[in-house]
Image (spheres, rainbow, N blue to C red):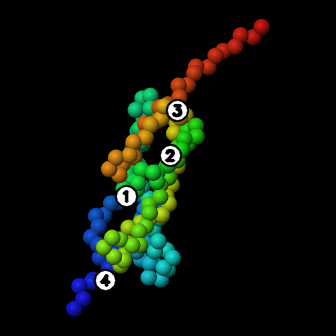
Amino acid sequence: MSNLTRYSPLSDVARFDPLMDIDNLLDRFAATALRPSWPEWGYVEPKFKMDIADVGTEYFVKADIPGVKKDDIHVSIDGNLVTISAEIKHELETEEGKMLRSERCYGKTMRSFRLDDEVIEDKASAKYVDGVLELKLPKKSVTAHKELAIS
């Protein structure tokens, strides 16, 4: 007798959230309902969630990127544009044997966002602990406009 059960994503119990992002809703629909008829749509790109806070003189960013090594995360800053990219590796072989089923997402993912103020790149810092990336991005001070005297 087989102990394996067939996986059905529609049988999972989920809490209804009326404020769910429409992109998330469409991604879930494509990943579940269309999977049998469109196998290439079954691939779900890995994503990570972020919080961005304006704390006076700096921005504070928290990004949940679980299952990624610190060396596989890259952060770039260009003025007020911040880009976070990560690569989640997929393991086909394990120490115990060959992988039979894999439901975790893997691949490269990237998020970019613009801030209201430019960031001082030299003073920005990043810390990655327990799957959470924390960025401290100090704002560039905006100099007051100087009025020129016309002679």
Quarter of the rendering occupied by the N terminus: bottom left
Q: Disc 4 and disc 1: Cα gap in Å?
A: 26 Å
Q: Residues within 10 Å of mark 4 (few under 14, many from 20)?
A: few
- The numbered disc on residue 75 is 2
Q: Nearer the viewer, mark 4 or mark 1?
A: 1
Instruction: Determine if residue 30 is in view.
Output: no
Q: Image height check: is 31 above or below 18?
A: below
Q: Disc 2 and disc 4: Cα gap in Å?
A: 40 Å
Quarter of the rendering occupied by the C terminus: top right
Disc with the residue nearer the chain's start (2 vs 4) = 4
Which one is in front, 76 or 34? 76
Q: Which element type, helix, strand or loop, lies under badge 2?
A: strand
Residue 69's spot in the image, x, y percent? 41, 54
Question: Type of residue at label 3?
Answer: Asp
Determine whether label 3 and label 1 are within 8 Å by CB: no
Determine whether label 2 and label 3 are within 8 Å by CB: no
Task: Name the residue that disc number 4 marks.
Answer: 6
Q: How many marks?
A: 4
Task: Name the residue that disc number 3 marks.
Answer: 122
Q: Residue at x 44, y 32 (%)?
A: 58
Which one is in front, 16 or 12? 12
Q: Residues within 10 Å of mark 3 (few under 14, many from 20)?
A: few
